[in-house]
Amino acid sequence: MKLIIQIPCYNEEETLKITLNDLPRQIEGIDRIEYLIIDDGCSDKTREVAKEWGVHHIVGFQQNRGLAKAFMAGLDGCLRNGADIIVNTDADNQYCGKDIEKLVKPILAGEADMVIGARPIEETESFSWLKKKLQRLGSLAVRIASGTDVEDAPSGFRAMTREAALRLNVVNDYTYTLETIVQAGRNKISVKSVPIQTNPELRSSRLFKGIWSYVKKSMVIILRAYMMYEPLKCFTYFSVLPTLLGLGIGVRFLFFIAMGQGYGHVQSLILGCTLIIIGFLTFMIGLVSDLVAGNRKILADTQYHVRRMEYDHIHHSCLSGRRDSEKNH
Ligand SMILES: Nc1nc2c(ncn2[C@@H]2O[C@H](COP(=O)(O)OP(=O)(O)O)[C@@H](O)[C@H]2O)c(=O)[nH]1
Ligand SMILES: [Mg+2]
């Protein structure tokens, strides 16, 4: 059983070494632990720090492409290198290395495919009152959208099996945290939360730039991820209000007609009809989106099988290469 711990980094030369030193060297039930760094176009010495420390794998981009893309590049690197379990943690030493064991345990016991570390948010001194409330609200929205019971959705401290990683995709550019949970829940990947501790803050968050941009981005990500899986439900909800309003106005108009006063109410007849048409068209868009979602499911399945073939092939050729070189020695 091989575990690869991946750390997304954007200019983390100051805190990376502290984080790496805190990582576990061995865990019961795991034969080998390797470490992977994602260099997201760092302009400082992050890469050198990682190399000097002895990190096994470094992947990344020349230019900064954001945490979501970096996370996916990390998963790719871990899968290529034959990880059976992948753990993601942050480079600012926010999470305690010793807690990685808690993340991995439910996976080893076959109880979950994805495990999310739930931070003690209420006790975190560096979080403002508003940030605490927003984190809670965000987690609630993700619970509803994903149908899971994750406690701390924006947590970057998580473990997943190779199977779960093969099925994940991130389409937004901001963060992987919320979307991957919605996907996992909707794809029936079992998700579990475990309580973990956090370390005192070494630097302020780079992702949380302002309350409103955070709320806006998170809302769009959650809604979009949910709509990808339940488009018909979403558009039916959207169509209910205009349809009911239109019907109400229509009934009112018929009532006036019955009373012999229809002539003065042509405007409301037009408004009623327009609202009913809007409601009907919204529902029709839902039907079309549902058909498109059917195609997406087939594509996601194809992608899963292609990934499996590709990664298993790479892994097997690496193993046979290693065996050959051992024989020659
Ligand atoms: N790849 C990549 N990682 C980033 C970026 N911004 C932040 N990170 C990483 O994401 C993790 C969490 O970032 P942080 O600023 O601590 O945000 P927090 O989760 O709100 O505390 C750290 O490992 C950062 O290095 C970015 O633009 N690209
Ligand atoms: Mg942080």
Image (cartoon, helix red, strand yellow):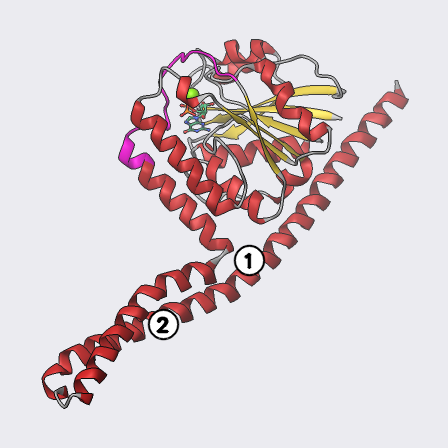
Q: Amino acid at mark 2?
A: Leu
Residue in the picture at 59% in, 57% down:
297
Quarter of the figure with residue 163: top right
Residue in the picture at 60% in, 13% down:
98
Instruction: State whether residue 249 appears in this view.
Output: yes
Q: Residues within 10 Å of mark 1 (few under 14, many from 20)?
A: some
- Magenta region, residue range: 197-214
Mark on residue 281?
2
Q: Amino acid at mark 1?
A: Arg
Q: Cβ(mark 2) to ligand 1 < 8 Å? A: no
Q: Residue 200: within the magenta?
A: yes
Q: Residue 232: within the magenta?
A: no
- Main SS of residues in magenta: loop
Q: Quadrant of the N terminus?
A: top right
**Does label 1 or label 2 sit earlier along the sequence?**
2
Residue in the picture at 35% in, 40% down:
217
Mark pair 1, 2: CA separation: 22 Å
Left or right of 214, for residue 274: left
Can you name the residue that lies furthest to the left here?
Answer: 264
- Of 23 and 138, which appears nearest the observer? 138
